[in-house]
Image (cartoon, rainbow, N blue to C red):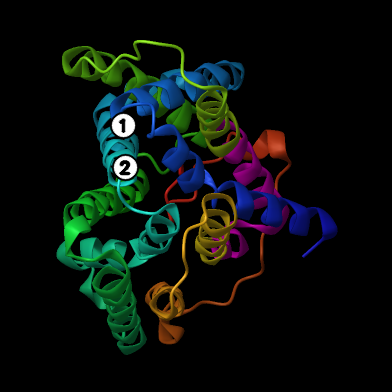
């Protein structure tokens, strides 16, 4: 990997590992739905002009049904329940549990009829991942927070269903158009949700909360999206997917350093088991692996016109 690739990889790993820290700070003053509204509105305002410049909005809107479904599961539903769960769960625990998303993706693929891809190694990965989740939920979370864990499970399914919809119905569309439109649709959807819930802020939030919202919208959404495409252009989508195993470590460290969250032995056990399980679950079948020459990587401007890699949650 080139020096530029290493810098991009490290930057995106950190950026996609810190949202849980800033969500935890923001939900202390803002409702989960208003935080999602603020984040989607700002991020959409930044990305929609870029998508318009690349003429990527109309192609995405022509497939409005799968686009709506993608926005619903990947952003509207996932972010609401993620924000709600973080009102009680530590940010480090949330980051670790969300590392089990590949396990949920495997379950969705299995239910959807893709049983031929389930190998013995994949099954071992599922078992390891379940042990890791059990270690964290059973020993770190406790029975009083099981409702928050259930909310986080809904988030996992949303983050797993989003890429599945993307791969099946939106795989040939420019990624910048899909994600910009999805953020814009989500922002519009949240307006009546916030209005009906009556959770508009009654006073100006504290500076640390405002900064948290801006970090989530600008850095963790809009800038992260551009960095993702820059990284794909630099190292390719396969190597880029390894970033999944960096984010949880960043989430744990951020929670411990900035919020004073305790790290137990079971946190370490769960961390290792979940990441090992996720790695085995996403490992391809060696019998079906085809060795091909790696294609030339496009420039960043060209990469923005490419489809999104349908492997991981696109917006954290």
Q: Secondary structure at mark 2?
A: loop
Q: Are marks 2 and 1 in contact (CB under 8 Å)?
A: yes
Quarter of the view holding residue 273: bottom left
Quarter of the view holding residue 33: top left
Q: Residues within 10 Å of mark 1 (few under 14, many from 20)?
A: many
Residue occupying the far right of the picture: 3
Q: Along the horizontal axis of the image, is 167 left or right of 151?
A: right
**How far across and down, in percent of the image, does residue 235 sit?**
69, 58
Q: Can I make out residue 296 in this image?
A: no
Report the Cα–Cα distance between label 2 and label 1.
Answer: 8 Å
For label 2, the residue is 87
- Magenta-span inclusion, residue 186: no
**How far across and down, in percent of the image, does residue 237 sit?**
58, 57
Q: Secondary structure at mark 1?
A: helix
- Nearest the viewer among 257 and 171 is 257
Rendered view: 285 above or below 102:
below
Which residue corresponds to the image point at 29% horizontal and 74% vertical from the top-left? 139
Sequence-wise first label, 2 or 1:
1
Which residue corresponds to the image point at 69% horizontal and 56% vertical from the top-left? 10
Q: Along the horizontal axis of the image, is 110 left or right of 57?
A: left
Which residue corresponds to the image point at 53% horizontal and 23% vertical from the top-left? 210
Residue 32 shows which numbered tag? 1
**How far across and down, in percent of the image, does residue 93 sit?**
39, 60
Which residue corresponds to the image point at 41% horizontal and 44% vertical from the top-left? 171
Over which residues does the magenta segment extend? Answer: 222-243
Task: Name the front one of labels 2 and 1.
Answer: 2
């Amino acid at each position: 990997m080139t020096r530029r690739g290493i810098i991009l990889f490290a930057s995106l790993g950190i950026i996609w590992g810190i949202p849980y820290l800033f969500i935890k700070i923001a939900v202390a003053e803002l409702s989960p739905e208003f935080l999602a509204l603020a984040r989607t509105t700002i991020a959409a305002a930044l990305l929609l002009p870029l998508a318009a410049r690349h003429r990527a909005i109309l192609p995405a809107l022509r497939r409005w049904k799968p686009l709506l479904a993608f926005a619903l599961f990947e952003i509207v539903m996932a972010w609401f329940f993620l924000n709600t769960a973080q009102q009680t769960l530590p940010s480090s625990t949330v980051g670790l549990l969300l590392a089990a998303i590949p396990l949920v993706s495997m379950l969705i693929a299995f239910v959807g009829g893709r049983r031929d891809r389930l190998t013995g190694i994949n099954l071992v990965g599922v078992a390891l991942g379940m042990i890791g989740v059990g270690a964290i939920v059973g020993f770190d979370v406790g029975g009083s927070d099981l409702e928050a864990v259930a909310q986080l499970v809904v988030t996992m399914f949303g983050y797993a269903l989003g890429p599945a919809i993307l791969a099946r119905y939106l795989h040939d569309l420019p990624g910048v158009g899909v994600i910009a439109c999805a953020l814009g649709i989500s922002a519009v959807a949240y307006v009546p949700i916030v209005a009906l819930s009556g959770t508009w802020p009654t006073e100006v939030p504290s500076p640390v909360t405002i900064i948290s919202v801006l970090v989530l919208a600008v850095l963790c959404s809009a800038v992260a999206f551009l960095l993702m495409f820059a990284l794909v252009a630099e190292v390719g989508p396969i190597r880029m997917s390894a970033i999944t195993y960096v984010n949880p470590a960043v989430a744990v460290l951020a929670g411990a350093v900035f919020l004073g969250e305790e790290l137990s032995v079971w946190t370490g056990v769960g961390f290792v088991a979940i990441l090992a399980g996720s790695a085995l679950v996403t490992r391809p079948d060696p019998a079906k692996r085809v060795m091909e020459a790696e294609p030339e990587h496009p420039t960043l401007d060209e990469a923005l016109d490419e489809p999104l890699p349908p492997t991981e949650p696109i917006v954290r």
